[in-house]
Amino acid sequence: MTRKTPTSSITLEESIGDVLLRRLREVGLAHVFGVASDFNLELLEQMESADGPKWVGCCNELNASYAADGYARTHGLSALITTYGVGELSALCGIAGAFAEHLPIIAITGAPRISEIARGGLVHHTVGDGNFQNMMECGRQFSVAQARISPQNAVVEIDHCLRACILQKQPVYLQLPSDLAHIKIETPQAPFLVTFSSDTEMLEDFVNTAGNRIRLYTLETHSRDLKPDEGDRWLND
């Protein structure tokens, strides 16, 4: 789904790559894991000159995905940069594991040029059939939000995917075509914010009607920063 860039509060002109890196900094990421390749080099060049996050190159994409897995467990959020096709498919086992364990990973893949995608070109790292939706479909199985970034949707889709990653505690998938990282767009000056609140009335109603004992302990307990003893709630008759 394509979302229009909002027109309110737009006061900066930035490249798409700089917008993405700024958002990663604003959500607290100090490091990004991955493997360099021709489809993501423009973004990595921007990262080298940016004020963070720091690039952590790995020996292969599968190792990078597990490094991102570990970082998400210890820091609450992580990011991974790979290349289209062979690179992201190699990382997919780690992303699938993170999806199963409710670990928030921002999976960014450098894709072929937007013109090649539009014409279904014969490009390396693809299966050669002109289908540029197949990798998106692979990523869709193990992520809660997906987008192919364009100049028209970059602001909205980047924020949408980051918000979904943080709130739902699962991976998201972003494709960045290799020729778009340096394209300048209008962006909001305001920093990225995620706000949410619990419905206390609904929780109280649930507690009052649940019976004598409630045990709130699931596979998500650790990922949502709950200690085992905080997962148990005992109610008197």
Image (spheres, helix red, strand yellow):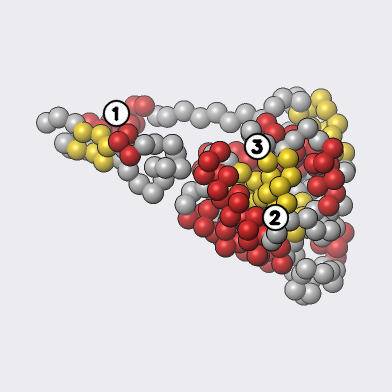
Tag shown at residue 149: none
Quadrant, the C terminus: top left
Query: Which residue is at 25% across, 34% downward?
Result: 233
Is label 3 in contact with label 1 (beta carbons under 8 Å)?
no
Residue 158 visible in the shown view: yes
Q: Residue 138: x, y in percent?
A: 62, 63
For the residue marked with disc 3, what is the amino acid? Leu
Q: Along the line of sight, which residue is nearer the eye, 43 or 153?
A: 43
Q: In the drawing, does residue 57 fall left or right of residue 119?
A: left
For the residue marked with disc 2, what is the amino acid? Cys
Q: Residue 127: x, y in percent?
A: 75, 73
Local SS, label 3: loop
Is label 3 in contact with label 2 (beta carbons under 8 Å)?
no
Q: Residue 160: x, y in percent?
A: 64, 41
Tag shown at residue 29: 3
- Quick check: 37 above or below 229? below
- Quick check: 185 above or below 133? above
Distance between the alpha carbons at the discs numbered 1 and 2: 47 Å
- Furthest residue in direction front, as rendered: 59
Distance between the alpha carbons at the discs numbered 3 and 1: 35 Å
Is label 1 in contact with label 2 (beta carbons under 8 Å)?
no
Distance between the alpha carbons at the discs numbered 3 and 2: 17 Å
Q: Which residue is mark 2?
A: 58
Q: Which residue is mark 1?
A: 204
Q: Residues within 10 Å of mark 3 (few under 14, many from 20)?
A: many
- Quick check: 106 above or below 100? above
Q: Residues within 10 Å of mark 2 (few under 14, many from 20)?
A: some
Q: Along the line of sight, which residue is nearer the eye, 121 or 73?
A: 73
First in sequence, mark 3 or 2: give its number.
3
